[in-house]
Amino acid sequence: MSSARATNVAALAAIAALAGVEHGIGEVLQGNVVPASLMFPSWPKSEFFRVLAGEPAMTVVPNLLVTGILAIIVSLTFLAWATVFVHRRNAGLVLIVLSFVNLLVGGGIAPLALGVIVGVAAMKIGVPLTGWRRRLHPRLGRSFAALWPWSIACCLLAWLMLFPGLPIIAHFLVVDGATVIPIIFLCALVLLVSSIFSGFAYDIEHETAT
């Protein structure tokens, strides 16, 4: 049975990879051109991404077509590592390195924050939770464990609200992205931390029950 920690990493890695691939597609569609600067919009002419300021990204590669291809490859590699190879030694460190590489090849800004946290969480997969079990009161631990499925579900919904949720809503309603995006992003980060810690509690309860 997959642990809550592994489920968290795989689910959140899928969100980060989706965002990276989406940035990459926008860059590929811009074609064989040189970016105007280190920072640039992945979707500069898309009305759909207007609320997200065209999805900002950065690259050290002086070609948007190559940048987009690399962003897609690195994002899919990140997803594969977080799901298939996550139990390997130093898998978490590999995910963190891939997150920074993705940033430098057009994978976007927000996926870096999510990817680094996912990498740190991956370092705890398979690690005995003896210390956590000693510090966590049994009753509090059961409460956190019961919270985990709801926490990870709300966390995923918050990240999906950034994309594609917010662009879809902005297509029909007037949305102030400068105000709404930081709020959603903060909520997503808080729920992310909650999911990770409640996942620890869930695994402690499972290990105790077995």
Image (cartoon, helix red, strand yellow):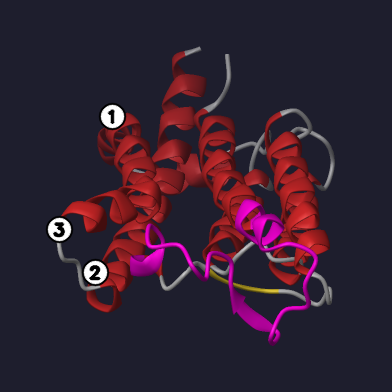
Are circles 1 and 3 on residues that touch, CB within 8 Å?
A: no
2 or 3: tag closer to the N-terminus: 3
Residue furthest toward the bottom?
37
Taking the image as shown, residue 137 lies to the left or right of residue 81, namely left
Q: CA distance from mark 2 to mark 3?
A: 13 Å
Magenta span includes 48: yes
Q: Position of residue 131 (x, y in %)?
A: 55, 46
Q: Amino acid at mark 2?
A: Val
2 or 1: tag closer to the N-terminus: 1
Taking the image as shown, residue 139 lies to the left or right of residue 20, namely left
1 or 3: tag closer to the N-terminus: 1
Which residue is at the front of the view, 44 or 164?
Answer: 44
Q: CA distance from mark 1 to mark 3?
A: 36 Å
Which of the two marks, 2 or 1, is nearer to us in this view?
A: 2
Which residue is disc 3 drawn over? 173
Taking the image as shown, residue 11 lies to the left or right of residue 143, namely right
- Rendered image: mark on residue 146: 1
**Region of the chain picked out in magenta, as a range:** 24-51
Q: Amino acid at mark 3?
A: Leu
Judged from the image, the secondary structure of the residue bearing numbered disc 3 is loop
- Rendered image: mark on residue 180: 2
Q: Quadrant of residue 155?
A: top left
Are circles 2 and 3 on residues that touch, CB within 8 Å?
A: no
Mark 1 nearby-residue class (10 Å; few <14, some 14–19, many ≥20): some
Mark 2 nearby-residue class (10 Å; few <14, some 14–19, many ≥20): few
